[in-house]
Amino acid sequence: MADIINALEAQSWSSWVYLDDAATLTGETDVLVIDPDEAELGNDDFTPLVVQEAGYSEFLSIADMQSVVSNLSQQISEPSLDQKIQALQHYFANDAFIRIG
């Protein structure tokens, strides 16, 4: 996950990040980054087949992740990877930006 977070601007905004439901989100968490519009879809005609086969679930879109990190960077100068992960987890759980301070 760290590689994706540290290179968000280089990622396609239309891609999504998928991860194992049982995984704890850290910089070391294995994720899949896929553009669902370009992927073969699984039996639900929504989830990419490779995601279904891996047993992963949708986390956030790259566009959402870019917005979350941008918002955090407006609140904290040079946020750490852990702070970015915390902000992403907060957004995923609450559909809202984290408020610092």
Image (cartoon, grey):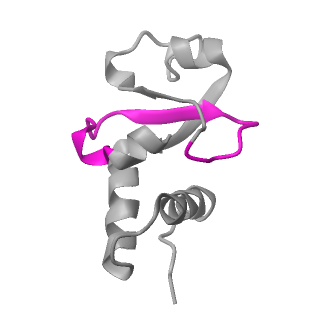
Q: Position of residue 35 (x, y in %)?
A: 35, 26
Depth check: 33 or 7 in front? 7
Would residue 6 appear left or right of 44 to someone viewing this image? left
Task: Examine the image and state in which quarter residue 21 appears.
Answer: top right
Taking the spot 33% from the left edge, 77% from the top edge, the residue there is 77
Would residue 73 appear left or right of 21 to someone viewing this image? left
36, above or below 95, in the image = above
Residue 8 is covered by the magenta coloring: yes
Q: Position of residue 15 (x, y in %)?
A: 35, 33
Q: Which residues are magenta?
A: 7-27
Residue reaching furthest right? Answer: 22
Taking the spot 23% from the left edge, 40% from the top edge, the residue there is 10
Depth check: 1 or 90 in front? 1
Q: From this viewpoint, is residue 61 visible?
A: no
78, above or below 10, in the image = below
Residue 5 is covered by the magenta coloring: no
Taking the spot 41% from the left edge, 39% from the top edge, the residue there is 3
Q: Position of residue 41 (x, y in %)?
A: 47, 13
93, above or below 16, in the image = below
Q: Position of residue 90 (x, y in %)?
A: 58, 64
Q: From this viewpoint, is residue 67 visible?
A: yes
Task: Examine the image and state in which quarter residue 12 appears.
Answer: top left
Taking the spot 50% from the left edge, 83% from the top edge, the residue there is 100
Which SS does the magenta portion mostly show?
A: loop
Depth check: 3 or 23 in front? 3
63, above or below 48, in the image = below
